[in-house]
Amino acid sequence: MINEFRRARRRKAPDTILVADAMTERVVGRIGNLSETGMLLMAGTPLVDDALYQFRFSLPGAGGGDSDIEIGAHLLWMDQASAPGQVWAGFRFIGLTEQQAGPLRAWINAPGSRYE
């Protein structure tokens, strides 16, 4: 039996949330799940192992408005997905400010959320 320990709850993305590289403005993939400390990304573009990225994405708000998030992320691991040319990638957020953490926390803890 494997006991897995995660420090932060991971909310499964119920809809498609596209993630763009903030430097190139190109979409690199979509969020699989998201926590206050990192995310699982289904990437459709090549990524560099152990690299640092600056990502931008929008989280739907409870009142209908979106919260735009721009955040630094460190690529921890990659694994081939079943679809050709796509990989699952695990990222750890770096330099998270309280201004970024607030909307992220609100989205993760919203009523009706599903967790992994």
Image (cartoon, helix red, strand yellow):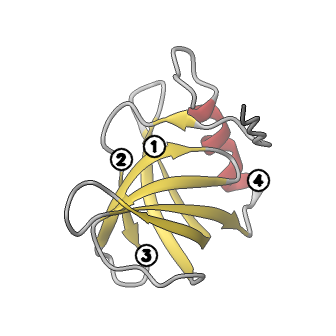
Q: Which circle marks residue 17 in the picture?
A: 2
In three-dimensional space, the C-alpha distance between marks 4 and 1, rounded to whole angstroms, equals 16 Å
Please give the residue where the numbered disc 3 appears in the rendered image.
22
The N terminus: image quadrant:
top right
**Residue 84 x, y percent position in the rendering:** 19, 64
**For the residues bearing labels 4 and 3, Cβ distance under 8 angstroms:** no
Tell me which amino acid carries mark 2: Ile
In three-dimensional space, the C-alpha distance between marks 4 and 3, rounded to whole angstroms, equals 20 Å
**Residue 81 x, y percent position in the rendering:** 33, 57
**For the residues bearing labels 4 and 2, Cβ distance under 8 angstroms:** no
**Residue 15 x, y percent position in the rendering:** 32, 35
**Residue 91 x, y percent position in the rendering:** 58, 63
Residue at figure coordinates x 57%, y 27% from the top left: 115
In three-dimensional space, the C-alpha distance between marks 2 and 1, rounded to whole angstroms, equals 7 Å
In three-dimensional space, the C-alpha distance between marks 1 and 3, rounded to whole angstroms, equals 16 Å
In three-dimensional space, the C-alpha distance between marks 4 and 2, rounded to whole angstroms, equals 22 Å
Secondary element at tag 2: loop
Residue 14 position (above or below residue 97):
above
Q: Nearer the viewer, mark 2 or mark 1?
A: 2
Q: Nearer the viewer, mark 4 or mark 2?
A: 2
Residue at figure coordinates x 56%, y 34% from the top left: 11
Does label 4 or label 3 sit earlier along the sequence?
A: 3
Q: Which circle marks residue 59 in the picture?
A: 1
Tell me which amino acid carries mark 3: Ala
Does label 2 or label 3 sit earlier along the sequence?
A: 2
Describe residue 50's horizontal placement relative to residue 14 as left or right: right
Residue 4 position (above or below residue 22):
above
Tell me which amino acid carries mark 4: Glu
Q: Quadrant of residue 111?
A: top right
